[in-house]
């Protein structure tokens, strides 16, 4: 593998996949992902069902200017200036049910986590988790590229409440699934030795039985990316294998964020920590870009590229042929970061799809 360094922006499950791919690089082949920026995430949405829902409310995708989640509501701002909104509690009709076994709200395994919950208008809540992440934030502060303030007690309490709600709700969902014999492997606390014992003979057929067929797949694209024989494909549907696995290849099973996760990656008491393990929490606004929720993610990515801290970033833009259909791509251009700014509330095999189109 070459020495290219890539910055990733992703949801908790995507960050988990990136972590596992690199931890088990001798099995998966690894990845160029060097910096992980995680997003706060309660759940993700299906493009197909979101489009269908909006059509039932006389809204076409091409009429939409912006999607937002704010103060407990899912907001659709239209090009003509009108707005459509529903409570978050009513989004279940287009929510991906596979998200309902995840207890990670703040992307615990990232270097820096970013979200809008808890911070005031125009700012983002930022959780710094690693020394690498802290160095980036400190450099941005020193160069006056960001404004940092303490997150208020009210903001911290709100964030804690929402994170704990996700943990509690989805722990119940896990218990419900397992009562009907749908095992949820990723939420089991196992040792590194147990993980290898359980995974070392597993191939795509096992991944299909243990994750995909029982409603655990989140379409992150990790299995497709690490597949050494290139037989796994994700084309707007669940992963499919078109051919036979190579003998003694277990890459997809190790890379999947919904198979076993060892306590070396996530400590056994992680669900008792609503923010995960971290160094500091703050609210931040970017001085380099005016964007949604303070432009923090875009500001960080621009800085990483401009200072050659990474060679490329992977982003989510829109499919040029399908309005608001998310499409991942890799770029080393600052203007691509600016153009891709904003949130896409839909499923996309972020990053890994784009990376799989490059030589690994």
Image (cartoon, rainbow, N blue to C red):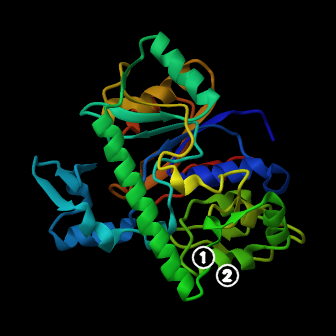
Q: Which residue is mark 1?
A: 212
Q: Is residue 169 above or below residue 344?
A: below
Is 336 displayed left or right of 132 in the figure?
Answer: left
Disc 2, disc 1: CB below 8 Å? yes
Please state if 117 lies on the left or on the right of 63 as rendered.
right
206 with respect to 167 (left or right): right
Note whether 177 is above or below 353 in the view shown: below
Q: Residue 312: x, y in percent?
A: 60, 33
From the viewer's perspective, is residue 248 above or below residue 291?
A: below
Residue sitting farthest toward the bottom: 180
Where is residue 326, by image quadrant? bottom left
Quick one: label 1, few (<14), some, or many (20+) residues within 10 Å? Answer: many
Residue at (63% x, 66% y) in the render? 186
Badge 2 element: helix
338 or 222, which is in the foreground?
A: 222
Q: Quadrant of the N terminus?
A: top right
Q: Is residue 127 visible?
A: yes
Kindly identify the residue that appears in the image at 33 percent across and 30 percent down. Answer: 294
Residue 157: give x, y in percent of width and height.
Answer: 33, 43
Which residue lies under the disc numbered 2? Answer: 209
């Amino acid at each position: 593998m070459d020495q290219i360094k890539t910055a990733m922006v992703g949801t908790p499950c995507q960050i988990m996949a990136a972590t596992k791919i690199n931890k088990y690089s001798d099995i998966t082949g690894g990845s160029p992902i060097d910096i992980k920026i995680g997003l706060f995430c309660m759940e993700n949405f299906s493009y197909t069902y979101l489009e269908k829902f909006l059509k039932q409310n006389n809204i076409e995708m091409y009429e939409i200017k912006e999607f937002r989640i704010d103060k407990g509501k899912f907001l659709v701002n239209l090009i003509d200036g009108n707005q459509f909104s529903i409570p978050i509690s009513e989004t279940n009709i287009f929510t991906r049910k596979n998200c309902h076994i995840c207890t990670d709200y703040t992307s615990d395994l990232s270097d820096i986590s970013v979200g809008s919950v808890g911070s005031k208008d125009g700012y983002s809540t930022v959780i710094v988790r690693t020394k690498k992440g802290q160095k980036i934030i400190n450099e941005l502060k020193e160069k006056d590229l960001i404004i940092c303030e303490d997150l208020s007690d009210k903001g911290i309490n709100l964030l804690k409440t929402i994170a704990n709600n996700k943990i509690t709700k989805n722990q119940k969902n896990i218990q419900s699934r397992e009562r009907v014999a749908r095992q949820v492997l990723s939420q089991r606390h196992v040792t590194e030795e147990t993980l290898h014992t359980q995974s070392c003979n597993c191939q795509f057929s096992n991944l299909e039985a243990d994750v995909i067929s029982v409603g655990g797949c989140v379409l992150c694209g990790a299995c497709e990316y690490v597949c050494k024989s290139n037989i796994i494909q994700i084309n707007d549907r669940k992963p499919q294998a078109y051919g036979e696995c190579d003998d003694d290849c277990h890459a997809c099973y190790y890379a999947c964020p919904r198979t076993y996760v060892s306590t070396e990656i996530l400590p056994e008491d992680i669900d008792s920590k609503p923010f995960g393990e971290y160094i500091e929490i703050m609210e931040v606004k970017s001085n380099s870009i005016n964007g949604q929720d303070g432009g923090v993610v875009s500001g960080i990515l621009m800085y990483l590229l401009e200072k050659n801290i990474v060679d490329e970033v992977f982003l989510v833009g829109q499919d040029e042929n399908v309005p608001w259909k998310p499409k991942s791509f890799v770029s080393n251009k600052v203007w691509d970061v600016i153009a891709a700014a904003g949130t896409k509330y839909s499923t996309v095999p972020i990053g890994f799809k784009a990376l799989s189109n490059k030589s690994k």
